[in-house]
Amino acid sequence: MTFKAPDSLSEQIAQHLAERIIRGELKERERIQEQKVTQAMNVSRGSVREALLILERRHLITILPRRGAQVSELTQQHVRSLYTLVMELYILLGYAVAEHWRTEEDLAPFRVIQQRLAEAREKEDILAFVDSSFAIMQAAYPFADNPYLQQTLDNLQPAIARTYYIALERRRGQMGTFGAVFDGLLLAVIDRDPVRIREVLLDYGKQNCELVLAALAER
């Protein structure tokens, strides 16, 4: 049994604010005032400051000298840069799972996630679908056994989740497409086919990036 320490207060505050940013309740360039958060959540100012530093590390806010914290922008360049980097990191995870899985038991977590994605698609539940998408990444971490890769992806995850939410909120039908991508990726992993893994993920990254850019253009 693995022990997991409870999240600190600062982490809980950061998660609360992150969810609001990801769902679009807090808009681009909107200021996040420490005092208001402190009063609204009945927490210390020090905890809020630490939470804001966590959000900055996760690319959801920018902290400007003498101007405080504001929700980071999502420009076309930001989105393209994010997807260019993240897809390469996902490919590394895919390679690691393909190389190290040995039994059907190793693949069982991915089968469960596959089912959860299908259920979320049926219900058109965006949040559940996004959460299940990132569960794939979490399930792949032990195969890579690379703390640097894991830390980098964990810090990028909220920014990616923000783009997923923007895209799927406007194109709910795309959940079926994303589910099919994971089905194809899992087959490539089972076949231990690195060329196919790379092709599937790069195609997925390109399609999703274009979808996000189109959604941004509509706003």
Image (cartoon, grey):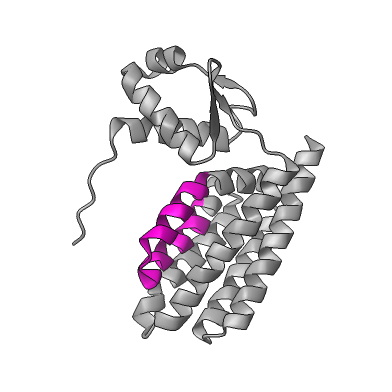
Residue 11 lies in the magenta-colored region: no
Residue 206 drawn at (x, y percent): 72, 61
Residue span colored magenta: 131-158
| Rendering coords of residue 205 (x, y %) | 67, 61
Quarter of the image where the N terminus is located: bottom left
Name the chief secondary structure element in magenta.
Answer: helix
Q: Quadrant of the C terminus?
A: top right
Q: 210 or 77: nearer the eye?
A: 77
**Residue 23 vs residue 11, the one in the foreground:** 11
Q: Is residue 160 left or right of residue 102?
A: right
Q: Residue at x 54, y 61 (%)?
A: 117
Q: Please give the name of the residue rendered at 54% of the width and 65% of the height, measured from the top-left corner.
A: 90
- Please provide percent x and percent y for residue 15: 42, 36
Name the residue at the front extreme: 65
Relative vertical location of residue 189 with respect to residue 11 in this rendering, above or below: below
Residue 64 coordinates in the image, percent (x, y): 55, 23
